[in-house]
């Protein structure tokens, strides 16, 4: 009888992780079936999704409150569906507020549960580790520093590395030339990739500051060119609205594009929201400036809970401030402009930075999807990772 896996991803990065994991599981179980919630990458591989992935794409402490009735209905529908399909295991990919609750219910009903991507228990709400221990049979982490807290609390865990570290190669000079040719950008100008996030809230909070700083930077260097990737139709529409508000259209010097990796490859510097994109920039060996703003109430709550010195992944992985972070009130046009000017004036040392990026890349290059699939197979076949 074919193996059947429940699987839920709540945003684009989870969709990419889920699709890569599905491919790896299909190597071991060619007839495997997948049912739950997924995005376009997972749907293309045959995942049966009972709703669109964007219905789970909420974040923060306050923002999800208005969606609670819908989310509770979705959780109940998934629980009943997964029980009816007698899934061999459930795999919750990130989206911990939703997935851990569903995992807890499924585990109490005898279904093996896997959580892929560790919640930030090492950063805040450390007592969640007890709820996690009660909810999951296996935690799959992306980063080595996340393993210790699970071992301390006897939660079966495996660090599988990050699939992006397996997939992405550093963007060398030839790749940079090709990317610029693709976008019609001269080879002898400075290029910045502006990446204010993919969610509507991120774009509305970060986009105006990023754009204002870029416009100000043009006063110092009129030859500067800016690439702005859009992850989908909704993001594109929001960014186009920002450009129109500043009296601009996509073209020269601000070009709206649909490929973030190519945009980063073409760039000398990436200005971006904190998140997975910062890891992508690291893997492509691109210097960066990281900015982020939360909704005011969410920041008020988070600032009283978070106990880590950094938020950007390169800095968390290095355990030091490798790249500049401009957070909340520090993210202003003036501060961001000053950071960009310092970079292009040669005031930021880059050779040592890129060496550290290389070291971090190698620590994460562990054949993640194969390892994750192997750990899941051991769980459902033997009930142990040994």
Image: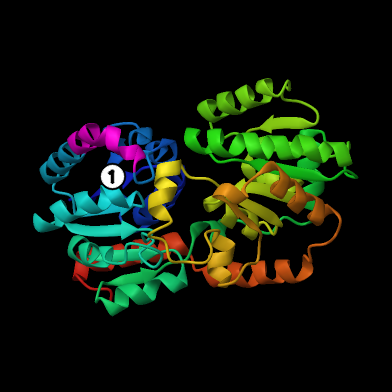
Q: Is residue 201 left or right of residue 256?
A: left
In the depicted view, which residue is nearer to us: 239 or 329? 329
The span shown in magenta is 62-74
In the depicted view, which residue is nearer to us: 337 or 329? 329
Kindly identify the residue that appears in the image at 29 percent across and 31 percent down.
51
Neighbor class of circle 1 (other Cα within 10 Å; few <14, some 14-19, many 20+) is many
Q: Is residue 239 left or right of residue 94?
A: right
Magenta: main secondary structure equals helix
Position above or below: 154 against 141:
below
Kindly identify the residue that appears in the image at 79 percent across and 66 percent down.
349
Say how the picture is coloured. rainbow
Kindly identify the residue that appears in the image at 23 percent across and 32 percent down.
70
Q: Position of residue 26 (x, y in %)?
A: 35, 52
Q: Position of residue 369 (x, y in %)?
A: 43, 59
Q: Position of residue 10 (x, y in %)?
A: 36, 42
Q: For mark 1, what is the residue?
A: 34
Position above or below: 356 against 61:
below
The image quarter containing residue 317 is bottom right
Q: What is the quadrant of the C terminus in the image?
A: bottom left
């Amino acid at each position: 009888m074919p193996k059947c896996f429940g699987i839920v991803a709540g945003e684009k990065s989870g969709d990419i992780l889920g699709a890569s994991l599905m491919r790896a599981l299909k190597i071991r179980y060619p007839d495997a079936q997948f049912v739950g919630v997924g995005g376009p990458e997972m749907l293309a591989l045959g995942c049966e999704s009972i709703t669109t992935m964007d219905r789970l794409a909420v974040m923060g402490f306050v923002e999800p409150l208005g969606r609670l009735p819908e989310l509770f209905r979705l959780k109940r529908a998934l629980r009943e569906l997964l029980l009816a399909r007698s899934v061999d295991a459930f795999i919750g990919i990130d989206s911990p507020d939703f997935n851990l609750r569903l995992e807890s219910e499924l585990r109490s009903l005898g279904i093996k549960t896997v959580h892929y991507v560790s919640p930030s228990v090492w950063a805040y709400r450390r007592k969640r580790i007890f709820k996690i221990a009660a909810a999951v049979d296996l935690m799959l982490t992306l980063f080595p520093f996340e393993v210790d807290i699970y071992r301390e609390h006897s939660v079966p865990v495996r660090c599988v590395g990050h699939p992006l570290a397996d997939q992405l190669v550093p963007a060398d000079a030839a790749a940079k030339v090709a990317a610029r040719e693709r976008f019609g950008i001269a080879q002898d100008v400075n290029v910045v990739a502006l990446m204010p996030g993919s969610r509507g809230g991120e774009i509305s909070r970060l986009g105006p500051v990023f754009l204002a700083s870029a416009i100000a930077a043009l006063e110092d260097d009129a030859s500067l060119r800016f690439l702005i990737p859009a992850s989908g139709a909704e993001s594109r529409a929001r960014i186009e609205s920002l450009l129109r508000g500043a009296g601009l259209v996509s073209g020269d010097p601000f070009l709206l594009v649909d490929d973030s990796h190519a945009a980063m490859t073409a760039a000398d510097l990436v200005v971006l929201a904190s998140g997975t994109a910062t890891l992508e920039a690291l893997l492509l060996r691109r210097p960066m400036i990281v900015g982020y703003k939360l909704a005011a109430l969410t920041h008020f709550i988070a600032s009283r809970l978070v106990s880590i010195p950094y938020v950007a992944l390169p800095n968390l992985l290095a355990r030091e401030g490798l790249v500049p972070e401009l957070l909340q009130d520090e993210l202003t046009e003036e501060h961001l402009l000053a950071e960009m000017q310092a970079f292009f004036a040669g005031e930021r040392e880059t050779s040592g930075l890129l060496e550290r990026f290389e070291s971090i890349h190698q620590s994460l290059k562990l054949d993640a999807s194969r390892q994750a699939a192997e750990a899941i197979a051991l769980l459902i076949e033997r009930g142990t990772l040994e």
